[in-house]
Amino acid sequence: MSTVKELIKLAESKLDDFNQDVNVAKVLFYHLANKQPHELYLMYDEEVDQELETKFLAGMEEYYQGRPIQYIKGVETFFGRDFKVNENVLIPRYETEELVENILYRIDDYFVDYENITLCDVGTGSGAIATSLALEESRLKVYATDISSEAVEIAKDNAMNLGANVEFMIGDMLQPLLEREIKVDIFVSNPPYIPQEQKIEAMVKDNEPHIALFGGDDGLYFYRKIFQGVRSLLNDRALLAFEMGFDQRKLMEEALQKYFPDDSYEIIKDINGKDRMLFIYHNLK
């Protein structure tokens, strides 16, 4: 039997040989052992039982073969909570946590005197945005849509497991909301924004759902689709919040001049200094 330290060092050495992230070994081990990261070092000299060692080695083998660690674990942490993920949903990213945080700041700025606020999240995937916002802000009534019924099932599970009250609907982009004549104060979306021909990391391209990644020739296909149809969903005062590609500022500003000529907007940089969030202030002063 191996000790924890021996098992992890062996996996780290193999990851290093493959030029892959050596931290994956520790992440998978503490997840399978059901421990916190800081507890791992206290266990280093303990022997690993056979069942755990077998699971760990099998999981590492999947990773060497190109499967994302989040799908192997079956969860990803987002805004301090564990969300179930699999191949039917995009893995939530840290940048998207920044979007959620900035939406919460703006709720305080623009909706401070509202007793109830209606929000929708279009293209919800794992439900990470919708569920996090519902849990962080009790005044929100949250709707979420996705075209994938498999994604909606995962999103429903996540909301239920975390105790969030979110109403999920299956359908293409705005359609379910328009059909029910829902009006919102806050419209949120993290649509697919990678241009069709752009080369992306093999682990992302080969595993995550393409429907959640690619946004047409220039990456703005879904934004334009939303911009064209969203007005009939908005209340008189409304905030629109999007994640966007870091290199899409110029294209986005051209689209905004066409579809929102009278509304102010803001493109905000993420923690890495990249243009990553778009906020449109519809009749908000």
Image (tube, rainbow, N blue to C red):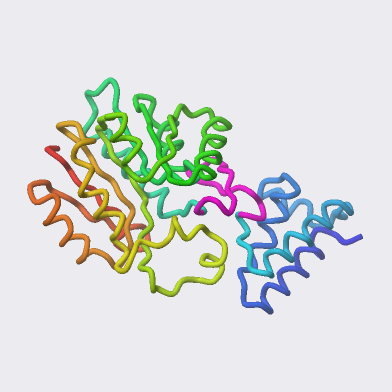
Percent of width and height locating residue 140: 35, 28
Q: Which region of the structure is painted magenta?
A: 71-90
> Residue 165 or 17: which is nearer the viewer?
165
Residue at the (68%, 72%) spot, across then down: 15
Number of marks present in the image shown = 0
Percent of width and height locating residue 45: 83, 57
* Image quarter in which the N terminus is found: bottom right
Residue that protrudes farthest toward the right in the picture = 1
The answer to whether residue 212 is left or right of residue 269 is right
Residue at the (76%, 63%) spot, across then down: 8
Residue that protrudes farthest toward the bottom in the picture = 17
The answer to whether residue 24 is left or right of residue 91 is right
> Residue 264 or 31: which is nearer the viewer?
264
Percent of width and height locating residue 112: 24, 27
Instruction: Place residue 238 in its image quadrant.
Output: top left
The answer to whether residue 257 is left or right of residue 82 is left
Percent of width and height locating residue 207: 57, 62
Residue at the (34%, 36%) spot, across then down: 120
* Image quarter in which the C terminus is found: top left
Residue that protrudes farthest toward the left in the picture = 262
Residue at the (37%, 45%) spot, across then down: 172
Tell me, yes or no, whether the highlighted magenta stretch contains residue 131. Answer: no
